[in-house]
Amino acid sequence: MKLIFVRHGQAAPYCDDDAGRDLTDFGRMQAGQSADAMVAEHQLDLIIASPYNRADQTAKILAKTVADAGQSPAFVTLSSITPDDDPAIGLNDIDRIIQDKFGEQTDDKCIAIVCHMPIVAYLVAKLDGLSPASFELAEYRVLSTPVIADGLAHCVASFVPDQP
């Protein structure tokens, strides 16, 4: 299966209501660039998004772009992939969602997971067994893996949109 990990686009400055921060106009443009690049290369079966506004908005831009291209992935909001969540719990929850949707038939599935730094770096590091590496705004990395398990994945592609 392919897991595409996406960091949200540029958001409004940090504030007390971190969950409520929206994408800026530039962040929406970044999300669109990443969505366009993704749809050109991948057929999505599922989009999983953090409930925080900036990630949800990024995921919805992706969902609209893939829908406009004739794809119809399911969309799930997952509360355990916010910035400071435990990556082991996040991966377990991602795995549970994938198993609930597809059972054991995941070889040909392509799932986008839209979340935040630092958890996105930790999720990828657990899967590929490498040290966590920072993601640029709206960057995505494609991991290929037979199952969700520590150290079994490898990065096969990535995309970085325009940066501020």
Image (cartoon, grey):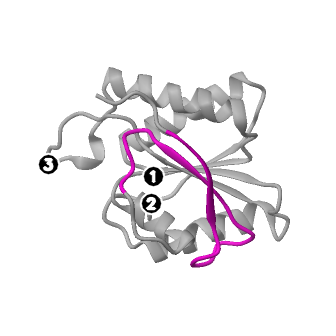
Give SS at disc 1.
loop
Question: Residue 50 got which mark?
Answer: 1
Where, by quadrant of the figure, is residue 57 drawn?
A: top left
**Is 37 contained in the magenta span?**
no
At x 68% / y 32%, what residue is drawn?
A: 39
Q: What residue type is labelled 3?
A: Asp
Question: Residue 79 got which mark?
Answer: 2
Residue range corresponding to the magenta coloring: 134-159
Q: Give the crowd class for mark 1: few <14, some 14-19, many >=20 residues within 10 Å.
A: many
For residue 36, side relative to residue 58 (left or right):
right
Q: Earlier along the polypeptide chain: callout 3 or callout 1?
A: 3
**Disc 3 designates what residue?**
16
Question: Residue 39 got which mark?
Answer: none
Q: Which of 104 and 132 is in front in this view?
A: 132
For residue 139, side relative to residue 52 (left or right):
right
- Where is residue 55 drawn, in percent x and y? 42, 43
- Where is residue 134 drawn, in percent x and y? 36, 55
Where, by quadrant of the figure, is residue 109 drawn?
A: bottom right
At x 39% / y 50%, what residue is drawn?
A: 135
